[in-house]
Image (spheres, rainbow, N blue to C red):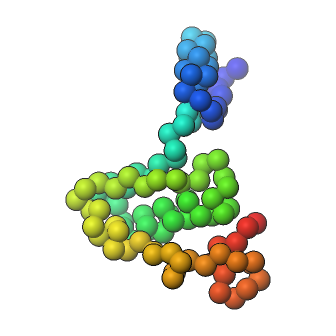
């Protein structure tokens, strides 16, 4: 085995990591981190907001990698918040064929 990806508990992930790296396998783990999106102070804010929203709501948030929290550096937090949409006025969930729909189940 050259590598593996695991999503699950910290205890199980820790055991997998110890065994896999003992054999020099590449390991990617998601162990309950709640899928943060991290925005640094040199980010293009409009793009960062768009990607954070898409990360949380694309696929109706049902992807195991959906963003469930956004961590923003303090120096840009106010500007990031000002650019962020305020549901439900700017985000509408409905069936995909409704013209007002911006988010819908796949």
Image quarter where the N terminus lies is: top right
**Residue 94 in the image, given as x and y percentages of width and height:** 70, 77
User: Residue 83: which quarter of the image?
Assistant: bottom left
Q: Looking at this view, name the residue that lies furthest to the bottom.
A: 99
User: Residue 4, relative to residue 20: is it above or below?
Assistant: below
Q: Looking at this view, name the residue that lies furthest to the top.
A: 22
Residue drawn at x 66%, y 81% as measured from the top left: 101
Depth order, front residue of 64/19: 64
User: Residue 106, relative to residue 90: is it above or below?
Assistant: above
Image quarter where the C terminus lies is: bottom right
**Residue 90 in the image, given as x and y percentages of width and height:** 51, 81
Residue drawn at x 52%, y 44% as measured from the top left: 34
As drawn, is 35 to the left or to the right of 106? Answer: left
Q: Looking at this view, name the residue that lies furthest to the front.
A: 88
As drawn, is 40 to the left or to the right of 10? Answer: left
Depth order, front residue of 62/55: 62
**Residue 16 in the image, given as x and y percentages of width and height:** 61, 19
Q: Is residue 91 visible?
A: yes
User: Residue 31: which quarter of the image?
Assistant: top right
Q: How many numbered callouts?
A: 0
User: Residue 64, relative to residue 62: is it above or below?
Assistant: above
Q: Is residue 25 visible?
A: no
Residue drawn at x 59%, y 29% as measured from the top left: 9
């Amino acid at each position: 085995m050259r590598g593996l990806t695991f999503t699950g508990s910290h205890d199980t992930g820790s055991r997998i990591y110890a065994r896999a790296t003992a054999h020099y396998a590449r390991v990617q783990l998601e162990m309950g981190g709640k899928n943060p999106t991290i925005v640094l102070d040199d980010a293009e804010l409009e793009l960062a907001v768009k990607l954070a929203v898409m990360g949380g709501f694309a696929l109706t948030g049902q992807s195991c990698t959906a963003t469930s929290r956004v961590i923003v550096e303090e120096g840009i937090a106010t500007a990031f918040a000002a650019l962020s949409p305020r549901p439900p006025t700017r985000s509408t969930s409905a069936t995909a064929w409704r013209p007002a729909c911006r988010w819908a189940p796949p």
